[in-house]
Image (cartoon, rainbow, N blue to C red):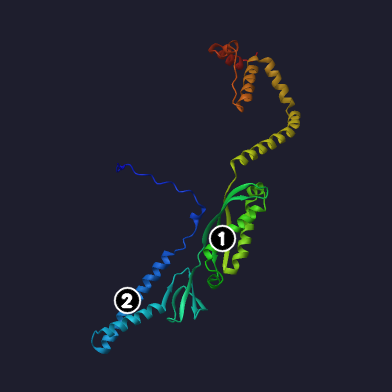
Amino acid sequence: MKNRKGKNQTDAPAAKPFSIEQYNSRTDRRTSQNGSLMFSAFVFVVALVLAIAAGYLITGAFTVWVVLVGFALACLAEMSIHIAMQWEKVVVLRFGKFSRSKGPGLSFTIPFIEQTALKADQRIMVTGFGAEETLTSDLVPINVDAVLFWMVWDAEKACLEVENYYNSVSLVAQTALRDAIGRASVSEVAIRRNQLDQELQEVIEERTSLWGITVLSVEIRDIVIPQELQEVMSTEAQAEREKNARRCWPRWRRTSRPCVVDAAHVYEQNEVALRLRTMHLLYESVKGSGGTVVIPSAYSEGFSDAALKNMADSLKTPK
């Protein structure tokens, strides 16, 4: 028998793992495509109507030849008139060689002789990239995520010098990040984030400037260190703090000697204060380790209501 699920028994979609690439700018440029297609359709329709109307005025009748000639002229007009958005630069080739860069606005080409090779988006682009399980100079595998901000400043070079500058920029950024991590230790990567940003920007800028691309900034977004190493680094930091505390202990002992003498006089005159101080020190000694303190029954009688009242009275009126 086949198992059939009810209407309410639907499989929950699996959660997609986080990826730094989700911050990438969209390269499909639907807004530009829709605007260009709508304009081309408008040019085609207008040219077709005008051509058929002119043919009717010349021949005095709607014939098949008038429609065919009008359709051909409309196709030529659609191939000749183009539009580029405010943020676009159009690269035009003539007989396969670079002719000119046009845009934004209207541009005209010669049908079958000139063609549009590239529409370069000159807005600021965002590329997320990362390095997974990359070894540092001290052989520690870490994961690093970064974000790259860049733009095309020369559409001619972006068209002629590289096949796909979107993918090329991403690959160059990943390679530069892995090289930078391999030359530094894990502590240097974690501490020198600003220096690493500047180094990556300079390296990527040097490699992509030949493609007409400018790197605006590189920002390290996240650094993931293995859990075992995090515990070791935390232990080392705690040991360093304890070492510094031991260095400061002799100086504190000299400066706090008058306070200790005053406290000794208070405890000598007030037994309840001494007992409270003893209880506090006992609590502090077991708080960090999570241990348990067993108090004898005779000692616990001191925490009865009557004993606590006597403690309060004695604190108000020292002996």
Which label sits on residue 8?
none
Q: CA distance from mark 2 to mark 1?
A: 44 Å
Residue 181 horizontal side relative to residue 114, left or right: right
| Position of residue 159 measured from the top left corner of the image (x, y, whole percent) | 53, 71
| Position of residue 241 measured from the top left corner of the image (x, y, whole percent) | 68, 36
Q: Residue at x 63, y 61 (%)?
A: 203
Which one is in front, 76 or 319?
76
| Position of residue 225 measured from the top left corner of the image (x, y, whole percent) | 60, 45
Which label sits on residue 45?
2
Q: Answer few, some or many: residues within 10 Å of disc 2's Cα (few below 14, many 20 plus, some between 14 and 19).
A: some
Going by the numbered disc 1, the residue's amino acid type is Leu
Tags 2 and 1 in contact by the CB under 8 Å rule? no
Frontmost of labels 2 and 1 is 1
Q: Residue 63's image quarter? A: bottom left
Residue 154 in the image: above or below residue 51:
above
Q: Residue 270's image quarter? A: top right
Which one is in front, 98 or 198?
98
Element under disc 2: helix
Residue under label 1 = 171
Going by the numbered disc 2, the residue's amino acid type is Val
